[in-house]
């Protein structure tokens, strides 16, 4: 009993220390992608818990094949409870992080018990529990996880991890039952389908759950079970969930390479260059996991040099060879040190989606949220407990505990930086002076201070402008700094340089289309509507037209820009003909998006074209497969009917 109380006390201290480490960061603000996904997302502003509002909030994301509805709904519920106060959004993230830590403790306990059984590891129950707690504590307090917690939108990552961990716990428990000759497949199936489905609805990384299960199977259980039928069922399970989808994906890719390669048109690197660069990026991640360096961490890593070849830079060759060595080590250790195999394979599996062929940005710290566990598990296990020593030595235990305390201290220091509303961005640019985004964010923070009248620094305008200009130099395609320079000049009552407007138009029309261009134009439009930004209508129209002239702007993104310009013509210039034309073009650019049918229908009703409106509403019904816009469609149908009745009455009289 005394030992249990002692253990429970230490576990409570770990969770308390996690909250204390992150507490200074809870006072910080929203960052970067928080704005388009949360702050500027009108459907997140949940005021009522009716089904229609919940559906709209849940499916309001522009990212992800499945729209990440669980994550988006959680943001909406945060707003419903406490508005857009970032403190409570971040506190919710810390709570999810703590739940994940508890989940990893339970998973580690089950894995170490399986390791003891399958590999005759000299572990007592007490040692298993303390090792599992140490590993969970290191993961909870590791500073590399900070952006996954305090960067609000990365709740998508942590929620996906939560359901993935739950699925893996059920899998491990089910596998243990199969080793005993008991019924374990129901637990495995529930973990796979339930955990995988829920995790994927948070973020697409949830689809990696079967791969994580395969890693555990190959490195720990090795397809051993008392009943031959259970072995066959396991083989069939992984053929269905891993082998067949993998072969199908590769077959489709090699037969339709343009399907993927087309997406690289708006990136500054090719598929081959991405793979070469990722070989170096993964080593950066590994270093930061094992030897964290706060000066190398950051929200943005767009300052990483792209590998243009195996020797450009030469570290690409070393990284590729070294990574091959890690894979060889994992194979070599499969029977000699299975937890090394488990850890390395886990890390690779966790990065197999976001760090391989999909044309995402090259590096983000939050991609290590769950993969990091694979490195911490063997490191702490072999540091604190190495066979043939039956009990961990006091010195090794002290070293492990000291390492965890150090991790927590660094996390607390970093959280303090993130808690400074504007100072955080200055830390970022100090650590990453060659990052275009870090320079932009530093300038933006100063611009907001100036705009809110909170800056007493007479050099603030000049400093902000210098950050923006540095950002423009570092990224020849970006327009975000240019929009910020226009806003800054307006709020500072300075003259807008016509060259900036020319450069915006040039970059929007000819440069690669950045992922955030649409959200930048949306913010630009809101500033115009609110009066915080003043520009002549011909300048505004020319900027939107420049974006539409870019052949790289297509699909939903093109439709959104057309809809924004239509709104400007309608509400600011009262030019309904141009608004109608642009609204129609939006429905053609994104023919499967009900929202553009509704925008067009609303405008058609306003101009008296009820037949055209009814036609668009029929398209909207067809496109609204999830019933998100059912109430909106019904309201517009009623408006069209009333309009029709009024027309008939006028004709009768």
Image: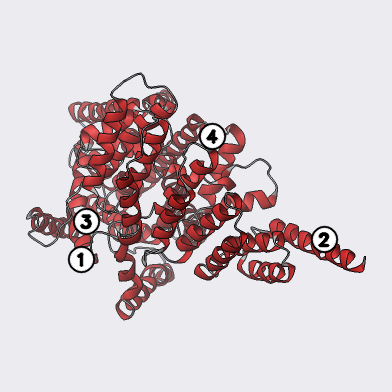
Front label number (4 vs 1): 4
Count neighbours of disc 2 (C-alpha within 10 A) and say few if under 14, some if 14 to 19, many if 20 or more. Answer: few
Spatial separation of the CA atoms under disc 4 and disc 2:
38 Å
User: Residue 442 versus residue 59: which sits nearer the camera?
Assistant: 442
Q: Which mark is residue 84?
A: 4
Look at the numbered disc 4 and give the secondary structure of its residue.
Answer: loop
For the question of whether residue 631 can be seen, the reply is yes
Residue pictured at 65% horizontal, 60% vertical: 603
User: Residue 92 versus residue 557: which sits nearer the camera?
Assistant: 557
Count neighbours of disc 4 (C-alpha within 10 A) and say few if under 14, some if 14 to 19, many if 20 or more. Answer: some
Front label number (1 vs 3): 1
Q: State which tag comes first along the sequence, 4 or 2.
A: 4
Q: State which tag comes first along the sequence, 1 or 3.
A: 1
The picture places residue 504, in percent across and down from the top left corner, at 34, 51
Q: Residue 278 carries which label?
A: 3
Residue pictured at 37% horizontal, 35% vertical: 489
- The residue that disc 1 covers is 272
Spatial separation of the CA atoms under disc 2 and disc 3:
59 Å
User: Residue 396 versus residue 63: which sits nearer the camera?
Assistant: 63
């Amino acid at each position: 009993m005394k030992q249990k109380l002692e253990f429970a006390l230490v576990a409570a201290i770990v969770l308390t220390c996690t909250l204390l480490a992150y507490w200074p960061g809870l006072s910080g603000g929203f960052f970067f992608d928080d704005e388009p996904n949360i702050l500027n997302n009108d459907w997140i502003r949940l005021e009522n818990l009716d089904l229609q509002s919940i559906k709209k909030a849940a499916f309001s994301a522009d990212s992800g094949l499945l729209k990440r509805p669980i994550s988006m709904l959680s943001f909406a519920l945060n707003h419903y409870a406490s508005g857009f106060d970032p403190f409570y959004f971040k506190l919710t993230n810390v709570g999810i992080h703590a739940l994940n830590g508890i989940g990893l403790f339970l998973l580690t306990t089950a894995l170490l018990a399986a390791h003891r059984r399958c590999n005759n590891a000299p572990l007592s129950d007490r040692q298993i529990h303390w090792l599992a707690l140490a590993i969970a504590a290191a993961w909870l307090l590791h500073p590399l996880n900070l952006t996954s917690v305090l960067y609000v939108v990365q709740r998508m990552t942590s929620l996906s991890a939560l359901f993935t961990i739950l699925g893996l716990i059920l899998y491990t428990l089910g596998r243990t039952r199969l080793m005993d000759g008991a019924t374990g497949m129901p637990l495995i199936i529930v973990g796979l389908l339930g955990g995988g489905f829920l995790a994927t609805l948070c973020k697409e990384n949830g689809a990696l759950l079967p791969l994580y299960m395969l890693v555990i199977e190959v490195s720990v259980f090795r397809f051993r079970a008392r009943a031959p039928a259970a072995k066959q069922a396991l083989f069939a399970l992984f053929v269905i969930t891993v082998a067949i989808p993998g072969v199908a994906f590769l077959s489709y890719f090699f037969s339709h390479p343009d399907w993927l390669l087309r997406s690289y048109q708006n990136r500054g690197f090719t598929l081959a260059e991405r793979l070469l660069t990722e070989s170096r990026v993964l080593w950066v991640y590994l270093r930061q996991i094992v030897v964290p360096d706060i000066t190398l961490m950051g929200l943005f890593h767009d300052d990483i040099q792209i590998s243009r070849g195996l020797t450009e830079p030469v570290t690409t060759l070393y990284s590729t060879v070294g990574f091959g060595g890690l894979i060889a080590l994992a194979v070599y250790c499969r029977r000699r040190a299975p937890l090394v195999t488990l850890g390395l394979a886990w890390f690779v599996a966790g990065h197999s989606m976001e760090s391989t062929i999909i044309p995402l940005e090259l590096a983000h710290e939050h991609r290590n949220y769950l993969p990091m566990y694979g490195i911490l598990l063997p490191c702490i296990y072999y540091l604190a407990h190495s066979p043939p020593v039956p009990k961990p030595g006091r010195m090794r235990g002290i070293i492990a505990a000291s390492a965890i305390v150090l991790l927590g201290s660094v996390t607390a220091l970093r959280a303090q930086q993130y808690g400074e509303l504007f100072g955080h961005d200055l830390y970022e640019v100090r650590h990453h002076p060659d990052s275009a985004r870090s320079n932009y964010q530093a300038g933006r923070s100063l611009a907001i201070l100036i705009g809110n009248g909170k800056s007493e620094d007479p050099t603030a305008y000049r400093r902000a402008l210098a950050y923006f200009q540095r950002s423009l130099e570092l990224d020849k395609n970006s327009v975000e700094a240019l929009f910020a320079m226009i806003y800054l000049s307006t709020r500072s009552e300075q003259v807008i340089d016509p060259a900036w407007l020319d450069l915006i138009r040039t970059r929007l029309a000819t440069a690669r289309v950045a992922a955030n261009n649409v959200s930048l134009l949306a913010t630009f439009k809101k500033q115009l509507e609110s009066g915080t930004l003043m520009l002549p209508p011909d300048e505004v129209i020319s900027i939107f037209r420049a974006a539409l002239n870019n052949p790289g702007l297509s699909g939903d993104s093109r439709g959104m820009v057309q809809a924004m310009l239509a709104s400007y013509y309608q509400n600011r210039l009262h030019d309904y003909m141009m608004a109608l034309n642009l609204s129609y073009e939006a429905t053609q650019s994104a023919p499967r998006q009900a929202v553009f049918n509704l925008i067009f229908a609303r405008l058609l009703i306003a101009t008296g074209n009820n037949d055209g409106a009814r036609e668009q509403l029929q398209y909207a019904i067809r496109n609204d497969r999830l019933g998100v816009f059912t109430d909106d469609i019904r309201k517009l149908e009623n408006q069209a009917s009333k309009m029709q009745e009024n027309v008939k009455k006028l004709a009768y009289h």
